[in-house]
Amino acid sequence: MLGAVPLLVTGSAASLGQVRAAETDAPVPSGKPQVEKSSPEKPSDGEKPATGEPGKDNKAKKAQNSPVPVAPDAIHYQTILLPTSDAAVDSGMKASSQLLALEKSHLVGPYALAGRIRDDYERLQGALRSQGFYAGQISIVVSARGRHMDGRDPLLAAFLLNLPHGTLVKITVSAKLGPQFHISRILILPPPKPASKSKMAQKSGATQAVSSPVLPPGPPRLEKLTPEEEKAFGLKIGQPAIAGDIIAARERLAAFLQEEGYGLSDVSAPQGILQSAQHGLEVRIFLKRGPKLVIGPISLEGLKHVHPSYVRMRMNLKEGQLYQPSVIDQAQLNLSDTGLFSSVTVRPAPPIIRISPDRSLVKGVDQAMPLQFTFKPGKRYRISGDIGYSTDLGGRAGVKWLDRNLFGNGEQLRLAAIATGLGGTAEQGLGYDIYADFNKPDFMARNRTLNLRIEALRQLLYSYRQTAFFVRGGVAQPIGRNWNVSGSALLEQERINQFHHTRDYFIASLPLEATFDNTDRSNPIEPPTHGVRAALGVTPSLSMEHRTAFYLPLTAEASTYLDLHHLGISPPGRSIIALRATVGTIQGVSSVWNVPPDQRLYAGGPATVRGFRWQGVGPHWKHTKYAIGGTSMDAGTVEYRQRIMKSFGTALFVDAGQVGEHSTPGEGKVRVGYGGGVRYFTPIGPIRLDVAFPMNRPRRGDRWELYIGLGEVF
């Protein structure tokens, strides 16, 4: 008979509950396992026994992780863990052994070391049991100066005490697995009645109560699972009695019942009954379903400046729908994502109430659990800076102000004033960018955003000098998890001076765009490590006032990210190859001169070809540094990104691109740039510094470019 043994998942706090031997079917005492005492001497200061009191034990755990003074009689030892035929057991033994974990950081004296060795027997035995080896045996042999002693020998402490100072002790741990037990029977039972009386056990003059669920006499009454519940449970007779699998089955069943509306269901921790002769384990789980529930009245606490109607619409939760934790959690996440609250908590608000059938959205279910959402408001206003530098566009510096909740429904108003053109080889003077941006969430449909923007812009580039005023209005709508579509109407009044000719333009356009992104980033500045990003844009445009012309710009861009971890080269997210391709064309015009200068296609700079100044790739005016622009463009990038330690990284890249004066991409002079940079990773994203050089520099082109910014280029 194996007797009562605990069944644990090694390295986890999860327990399979009680396991007892079938021969006696006696309850397992709830007290601690007995530990043989080695001698009456006190342990050294290096190691203290657990008190059994939560507060003191927590302090002991903290002390275990802190540097401990080495005792004068400390013994240096080496733990040798011999492998078994089961890799999972080996891993569990390595994770469980205190001898192995503390041999370098917590040296102790002979008596404490003898106690540590004895304690490891039960820890290592647990590693065997967690994989179903209930008949396995642990052997620990202590060797020094040609002598070998069993780890349970009562004279072990004295043997260690008499060793000369500085002797290295070898501790060899091995395991005899024996047969692996399998699940022989699975009982899903109704909640047991508590024992009528507590059995009393007397030990060393102390009295302790021992209680265990009592099954009624006769064949047990079983709780029948539906086919869907059986599938979720997934535990089968005959499979190895691995504790982690049994506990996971219990957790799957509990989660499934909750998602089916049994909000008060309770699935007990599994109990095991050893069938020693058959090398089997009988698994018992006590199941209480409780009533099926729908969501009852929803109360909102702590709202100050946000309208309750917006909160109820945003949470996407209705009274009377099936009570499901995942749906409630998603409602909490929906509200947190608004950015209006510093915290959102939700809890059931019993008691359960009965509702009329017309209020329930689930046929036949009239019991409802009320919910209470509690909010703490977040910061409504934010002021931030905008700063950046590159050798071609020079510096930019400005300030932005944000109101997150303008009218009480999550409307955002952002005001910005930015100075541009602070030096730079592609700039001829100081410019500005001033705008007001308004976003209204959930505009006429859930997750649809209305955007209104007015903007004043002045930029003095070598290609052209522009002073413009924009008015734009549009909507954006996500489709599924990864797609987003947007459309807007844009009116632009501008004055442009190019090559000593000044012209006024009035342009009306309809920018339409579809984007795809499955890189799973938590914010736009976070560097992608996998997946694909793609965008396709179509902008029907009509230029009036100077010369009436209709033209149709088409653009497409795609990037992908390859994690070298998949090739076994590096840890996840540390070594990335990033690829980018961009193509554009303007249809409907016979000459590039029929397109306003700011609407033409250009290349050069971080968005296309680094190493060339902004708009430095493509046709130029009479061999000067003044770019004309084109009606076709294509560019590509290969970049290698490497994280170094926790906060640093590097990048190497090669860019290539061309701009043509015809509408078919693939024409023009191909320009190639190359370079590298460093990254410093902050909580919001990396600070980037890149240096790039042109491989085939044009006449009057820059010899190198420097770029400083926040986030990766793509």
Image (cartoon, rainbow, N blue to C red):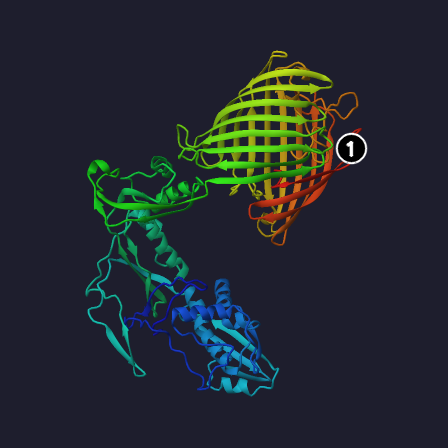
Residue 262 position in % (x across, y down): 28, 48
Instruction: Tell me, yes or no, if residue 235 can be seen here.
Output: no
Instruction: Please tell me which residue lies in front, 223 or 304.
Output: 304
Q: Is disc 1 placed on a helix, strand or loop? A: loop
Q: How many marks?
A: 1
Question: Is residue 679 toward the left or the right of residue 74 in the image?
Answer: right
Percent of width and height locating residue 290? 24, 51
Q: Is residue 267 left or right of residue 421?
A: left
- Residue that label 1 marks: 696
Specify the amino acid type for callout 1. Asn
Instruction: Report crowding for label 1: few under 14, some 14 to 19, many 20 or more residues within 10 A (C-alpha).
Output: few
Q: On screen, 10 above or below 619?
A: below
Residue 400 on image: x %, y % = 55, 36
Say whether residue 344 is left or right of residue 354: right
Residue sitting at 43 percent across and 39 percent down? 338
The answer to which of 692 and 278 lies nearer the viewer is 692
Dividing the picture into quarters, in which one does residue 600 lie?
Answer: top right
Relative to the observer, which residue lies in front, 228 or 704? 704
Is residue 303 among the parts visible in the rendering? yes
Q: Position of residue 215 (x, y in %)?
A: 22, 64
Q: Is residue 578 above or below residue 23?
A: above
Question: Dividing the image into 4 quarters, which one contains the C terminus?
Answer: top right
Above or below 693: residue 29: below
Which quadrant, please, contains the N terminus? bottom left
Question: Left or right: 349 with respect to 96?
Answer: left
Q: Nearer the viewer, residue 446 or 570?
A: 446
